[in-house]
Image: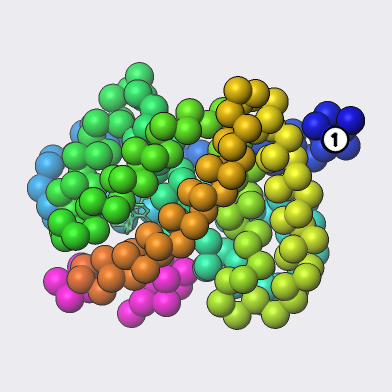
Amino acid sequence: EKAEITKEQQAFMKVIVDSYNRHQIPQDVTKKLLQEQYSAEENFILLTEMATSQVQVLVEFTKNIPGFLSLDHEDQIALLKGSAVEAMFLRSAQVLSTKMPNGHTEVLEERIRNSGISEEFMTPMFNFYKSIGKLHMVQEEQALLTAVTILTPDRPFVKDHPAVERLQEPMLEVLRKLCALHHPREPQYFARLLGRLTELRTLNHYHTEMLTSWRMNDQKFTPLLCEIWDVQ
Ligand SMILES: CC(C)c1onc(-c2c(Cl)cccc2Cl)c1COc1ccc(-c2ccc3[nH]c(C(=O)O)cc3c2)cc1
């Protein structure tokens, strides 16, 4: 029957979910959220460290997505560069929308709100965080939604669109079945989930402006972030 998740899809999903759970920012980095002092300068430095660590984790997760490593190498880079900010919004959204026992939720929000980001970006950013929170995604959905975001064919400079679509399609199919399984009373849940991906695209534009305003204040990024965001 259409809605059943097949054995192959189960195995396919397990690879992605296990990789997603395995690749997390190390404790010694995230525990700094609670330790460092609260100044705009210190918050920016800490968030830069978190983003750098998150990009490294993201690259490892992406390499485990079935078929990703057989894509054209330049397309692999284009997909990572094109999706990094969106994937980090999704990841930070999970931290900000679930009450973390370690108290990281509150301190992360506090540091983001006081890191030199102008008010005009705060509203759309935290509206997104709220809308993700309302979805109460299960971790399989979070993992697959992140993989679907990374394997979005129409990123800048991607040459072989069809090859990326062939990888994204089976993930969308499993995600659709998962939504039906975990949210049986919300037939529109899958559509709402994909709607978040559209909202993420708009956040990309805000993020580009955030980077520009940080750079205007001579804020420094790490080499990895400079490379992935084409700055400096
Ligand atoms: C370079 C820095 C200042 C930056 O620029 N834009 C953003 C930026 C911003 Cl604010 C918002 C959204 C996206 C970006 Cl990309 C950031 C900071 O980005 C991140 C902040 C936190 C986390 C993150 C991810 C996983 C985590 N787990 C835990 C834990 O306690 O387990 C904490 C945590 C933090 C990831 C990226």
Residue 226 magenta-highlighted:
yes
Judged from the image, the secondary structure of the residue bearing numbered disc 1 is: loop
Nearer to us in this view, 53 or 131: 131
Q: Nearer the viewer, residue 221 or 184?
A: 184
Q: Is residue 113 above or below residue 4?
A: below
Is residue 148 highlighted in magenta?
Answer: no
The answer, for residue 30, to whether it is visible in the render is no
Report the residue at 18% width, 53% height from top.
115
Q: Residue at x 60, y 66 (%)?
A: 79
Residue designated by label 1: 2
Q: Residue furthest top?
A: 101
**Residue 121 figure quarter:** bottom left
Give the quadrant of the N terminus: top right
**Which residue does the image show at 53% across and 31% down from the upper left?**
137
Give the amino acid type for the residue marked by disc 1 in the picture: Lys
158 w.r.t. 93: above or below? below
Name the residue located 23 percent from the left edge and 47 percent from the top edge. 112
- Total marks drawn? 1
Give the extent of the magenta segment: 215-232
Where does the image place residue 95, in percent across and percent down from the top left?
39, 35
Q: Quadrant of the C terminus?
A: bottom left
